[in-house]
């Protein structure tokens, strides 16, 4: 897969490029024909995988459970079936004590399905914390232009680790939603530089919201996943309090600024132009030297 960009692949291509050759076994594949009942009622085309591919595979010979969202189907949004597949996968990971990897490409909950999608997100979060209580590694990969927003953005932060590339985006509300409520002067969703400097992988890595910043290639993402498959991050009252203190410091330091470059400078990036042009790993090195 040399030369292929990870963010340009489809969900199944991503799985094929990450998993050991021939090791992926899909659970509830399209021939099972499990589709959303709500979309059909609204006269909206359905997908026989409901926008998410799940199964088990191996990376470097180590068994994992693996899911990849399909951004081409209603933006990878989560509905009842989509969410049930995701919840079941994390529950299986907890039961079998096998690491679980989620390749995210979603704007959040599927509005057509309302509360069903919201409940599915909550149930998946619970399943993730079941994994973490058992020290079963959970890893979110955020590496596409659609990114991880809304409920899925929150869900990703429940995982032990987040791997991002410079193409990935992470946040609660997407750029268009922010512009709608705050106005174009406050946030121009068409300004790609602004969008990526506020919710992109580089900024999220700087702020500690991403644990690894990988190059935009299947090989680099695979290597980043492999390094985390034997690690887990404890959930405790002490760790939650420590994280809260970090967030309070961030708010105090950057809460009044509307210039993303000021955030980069405040986090130790000395050469903004060079950092903007750098690849993910190059940026990580620049940021480390600047601290």
Image: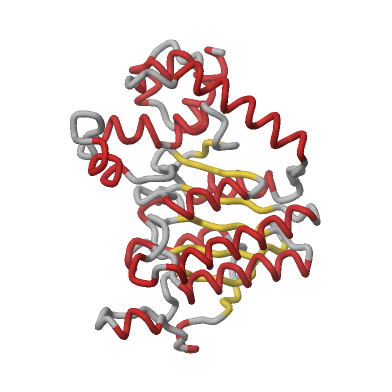
Which quadrant of the structure image shows residue 247?
A: top right
Q: Is residue 21 left or right of residue 53?
A: right
**142 and 3: which one is in front?**
142
Q: Residue at x 34, y 46 (%)?
A: 174
Q: Residue at x 42, y 56 (%)?
A: 105
Residue 23 seen in the current view = no
Answer above or below: position of 236 versus 139: above
Reply above or below: 79 against 199: below
Q: Is residue 143 above or below residue 119?
A: above
Picture coordinates of residue 242 (x, y %)? Answer: 70, 29
- Quadrant of the image for the C terminus? top right
Would you identify the image quadrant in which residue 114 lies? Answer: bottom left
Determine the residue positioned at 52% across, 27% down. Answer: 207
Q: Position of residue 14 (x, y in %)?
A: 47, 60
Where's residue 208, x and y in %?
A: 57, 31
Q: Is residue 37 above or below residue 167?
A: below
Residue closer to the observer: 35 or 221: 35
In the visual, does 201 lie left or right of 146? right
Residue plotted at (63% across, 31% down): 244
């Amino acid at each position: 897969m040399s030369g292929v960009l990870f963010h340009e692949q489809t969900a199944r291509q991503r799985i094929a490029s990450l998993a050991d050759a021939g090791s992926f076994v899909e659970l509830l594949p399209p021939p099972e024909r499990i589709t959303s009942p709500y979309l059909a009622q609204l006269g909206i085309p359905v997908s026989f995988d409901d926008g998410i591919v799940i199964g088990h595979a191996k990376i470097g010979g180590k068994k994992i459970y693996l899911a990849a969202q399909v951004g081409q189907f209603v933006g990878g949004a989560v509905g009842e079936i989509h969410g049930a597949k995701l919840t079941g996968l994390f529950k299986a990971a907890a039961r079998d004590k096998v690491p679980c990897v989620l390749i995210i490409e979603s704007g959040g909950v599927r509005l057509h399905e309302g509360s069903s999608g919201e409940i599915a997100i909550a149930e998946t979060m619970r399943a993730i914390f079941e994994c973490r209580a058992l020290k079963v590694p959970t890893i979110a990969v955020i590496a596409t232009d659609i990114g991880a927003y809304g409920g899925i953005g929150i869900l990703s932060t429940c995982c032990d680790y987040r791997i991002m590339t410079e193409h990935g985006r992470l946040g609660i509300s997407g750029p268009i939603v922010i512009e709608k409520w705050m106005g174009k002067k406050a946030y121009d969703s068409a300004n790609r530089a602004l969008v990526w400097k506020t919710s992109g992988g580089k900024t999220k890595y700087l702020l500690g919201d991403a644990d690894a910043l990988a190059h935009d290639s299947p090989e680099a993402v695979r290597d980043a996943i492999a390094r985390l498959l034997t690690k887990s991050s404890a959930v405790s009252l002490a760790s939650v309090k420590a994280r809260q203190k970090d967030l309070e410091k961030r708010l105090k330091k950057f809460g009044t600024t509307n210039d993303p470059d000021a955030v980069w400078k405040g986090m130790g990036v000395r050469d903004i132009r060079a950092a903007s042009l750098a690849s993910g790993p190059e940026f990580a090195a620049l940021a480390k030297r600047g601290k």
